[in-house]
Amino acid sequence: MDRRHFLGLGTVAAGAALAGLPLRADDKAALPAPIAKLKSMRDQAKPITVDERRVRIERARQLLGEHQIGALMITGNSSLTYFTGMRWWQSERLFALIIPAKGNAFCVCPKFEEDRAREQISKGPLGADAEVRTWEEDESPYKLVAAGLTDRGLMSGRLGVEETVPFAFSNGVAQAAPSIQLVSGTPVTAGCRMIKSAHELELMRLAAKVSWAAYKAAYESIRDGMTDREFSALVGEAHRQLGFEGGADVQTGIYSANPHGSLMPQKITEGTILLMDGGCKVEGYASDISRTFVLGKPSDKMKHVFDIVHQAQTAAVKTAKPGLACGDVDAAARKVITDAGFGPDYKYFSHRVGHGMGMDGHEWTYLVRGNATKLQPNMVFSDEPGIYIRGEFGVRLEDDMVITENGAELMTPQSPNLEDPFGAA
């Protein structure tokens, strides 16, 4: 049987899946052949260097000056990793990095976490001599932020707050430093992160390549009657076989008409549409890919809807180019779908055509109506139009798209049809 039809799992693998046990990539006998034969791509992933992070901090200082912001406050999130390489679980206790436009950056850290913090800080661009101000459990960390700003002559200026900083933290700083004006730090963080370096693009292309290969191997390993969770487990094991952690959410039949799916138990059966959406991270950089397919023979309506979505995805990538407003890319894809009778507005295509990507699966900026932000070379977005018909099925096609000097290109091959979703490569 070819890959448009049902492919059986081995007896061991099927038994493990039906028992609810995870398939493990280190147990080759329990893996379907298409997954077992995958080779690790781990050695292709080169970590971001300390020097690269130093350049990022200097770029942040430049943007702080341009936007007349005295300093930037970041807590335990992807921006902290972006600038320093640190990975910090964000709890109710404040850990903060303060990057001033001028002067040395400093950290505020719980005293009992100091050793762990210094261990990570010493390996990054701040170095082993970085200033770390610590607070005991009965002390206010916000007073330490205020004192650090005072020492740098910033008590009457503006403090940019990274957008994911919890309100309790920013409010605590506002109470401790009432003369400081708190403003959005997004012009700085997004200003740095929206435009990818050549190294970042290399990592994102690899992440897309890994997820595409994992999806394909899982698709080739599917069998009649498999549940959505069993198929998701195959996707996860395929990613691990390739050397990375990743996966996909899987929705079938009527549940595929909900863009983010359902928690209801589902089974994969012949003639039923299946929508998978997920990805992985390579050295912290994300992929985000969706494929829609049917095992067996799709209906004429399914094929018709797929063709429209395919045309919309193509319209988006052909329209996108430097200098164009982000909203115009959404408009190009939406026009295809509306002109085909699946409008108006968000009736069937119920979300924007794409989101920015990088260290977060969703980050600034967005391909959505009304966004006048101009596209620039080396921005990365998802390109993911969809049509969702409640009570019947949904189709979404998603590939990751990079803006080039003269236009845009997808990082993975477009899906050609519902019966052979990986036939283009």
Image (cartoon, rainbow, N blue to C red):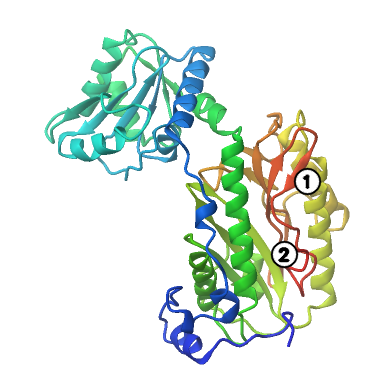
Task: Sort mark 2 into few (<14), some (14-19) or many (20+) by Cα contacts within 10 Å.
Answer: many
Label 1–label 2 contact, CB within 8 A? no
- Determine whether the residue tagged by mark 2 lies in a helix, strand or loop: strand
Q: Amino acid at mark 1?
A: Val
Identify the residue under disc 1.
317
Q: CA distance from mark 1 to mark 2?
A: 18 Å
Q: Classify the position of the N terminus by image quarter.
A: bottom right
Q: Residue at x 46, y 73 (%)?
A: 25
Lower sequence index among marks 1 and 2: 1
Q: Amino acid at mark 2?
A: Val
Q: Is residue 364 visible?
A: no
- Determine whether the residue tagged by mark 1 lies in a helix, strand or loop: helix
Q: Is residue 223 visible?
A: yes
Rendered location of residue 357, percent (x, y): 59, 43
Q: Residue at x 78, y 64 (%)?
A: 424
Front-most of residues 275 and 26: 26
Rendered location of residue 144, percent (x, y): 22, 22
Identify the residue under disc 2.
395
Q: Classify the position of the C terminus by image quarter.
A: bottom right
- Residue 366's image quarter? top right
Rendered location of residue 139, percent (x, y): 14, 29
Rendered location of residue 304, percent (x, y): 85, 68
Task: Sort mark 1 into few (<14), some (14-19) or many (20+) by Cα contacts within 10 Å.
Answer: many
Q: Nearer the viewer, mark 1 or mark 2?
A: 1
Q: Is residue 112 left or right of residue 302?
A: left
